[in-house]
Image: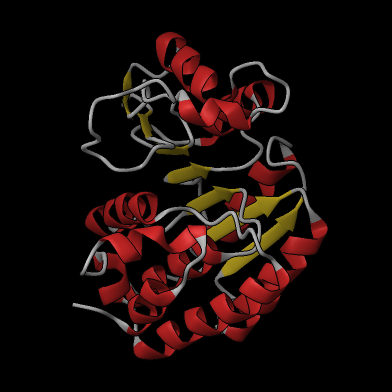
Amino acid sequence: MRTLFGRVAAEDQGVDYTWFRNNDYDPPFLHVIDQADHEVLVAWREQTAAEWPNSGSSGVEMMSMLSGLIMSAGLSRIVQCGHYVGFSTLVLGFICRKMNRKKFLYTVDLDPKPSAYTQEWVNRASLNDDIKIAVRDSADPQNVIEAIEHLGGPPQLVYIDSSHQYEHTMQELNLWWGALPPGGLIVMDDISQWAAEYDRTGLGGSHRAALEFCQTTAANSVLINGNFGRATTNPMIYTDVCGFGLLQKPY
């Protein structure tokens, strides 16, 4: 069944919406949110397509996994590293509002221009009291102080989708792992071999960082599509070439 945003996305020829053209149904997170929130997403899409040709949005697969985890566990304290122009921030905001959560998201990005754009849409969606947007390096320890203050406690889940560079991702992992309580979660985007190409330093990106961190620190972890690369010939089961990482801090 198609939602309002799903119908619009299925007609969009942009690369960000390929999933909607390949499937005749919408993911659960779009069925959860209200009609008014769908209208905000449609307006966001129209303006963003004109002003930001490459929105860098988190994919449908990632948002499905992430939203399902948040809703099923009833989480209320979330940190996002890398929001860019705000699609995932809005979706997370709409979902948490539907869950009757307050002050549920602290999101940080280094780039001031897309952060200002995201702030405009957060304001338009009436989420500004519940979402704190910071313009700063996501590996800066000051974020932990501000996040705990905004969320009212340590983050239960940290979503990392920022620079995709190996050294910076390792810094993020070490910082936020220390901020998590026992049982806390880190979700990582772009952990596949294919996505390692996003690292402009050529050091292996989030893929290498995830592998090394899991081997040395996060034994309770799963990296879906971690070994998917350009040379992979087997058909995909989980259809996100960028992969999905889930790390849990031991109790």
Q: Which image quarter: residue 28?
A: bottom left
| Above or below 250: residue 93 | below
Q: Is residue 120 above or below residue 195?
A: below
Tell me where residue 39 appears, x and y as whole percent: 46, 88
Most extreme residue toward the top, as rendered? 216
All told, the count of numbered labels is 0
Q: Is residue 107 above or below residue 94?
A: above
Residue at the farthest right position: 112
Percent position (x, y) of residue 205? Answer: 59, 24
The residue at 48%/68% (across/down) is 13
- Residue at screen point 29% across, 43% down: 239
Quadrant for residue 233, please give it: top left
Q: Nearer the viewer, residue 70 or 162?
A: 162
Q: Which quadrant: the C terminus?
A: top left
Q: Residue at x 41, y 80 (%)?
A: 8
The N terminus sits in image quarter: bottom left
Q: Colour scheme in the image?
A: secondary structure
| Nearer the observer, 152 or 30 | 30
222 vs 56, left or right, is left
Locate residue 86 relative to residue 9 in the image: left or right: right
Relative depth, front residue between 21 and 148: 21
Q: Position of residue 238 (x, y in %)?
A: 25, 40
Residue 38 to residue 143: above or below: below
Locate residue 54 relative to residue 17 in the image: left or right: right
Q: Residue at x 49, y 78 (%)?
A: 41
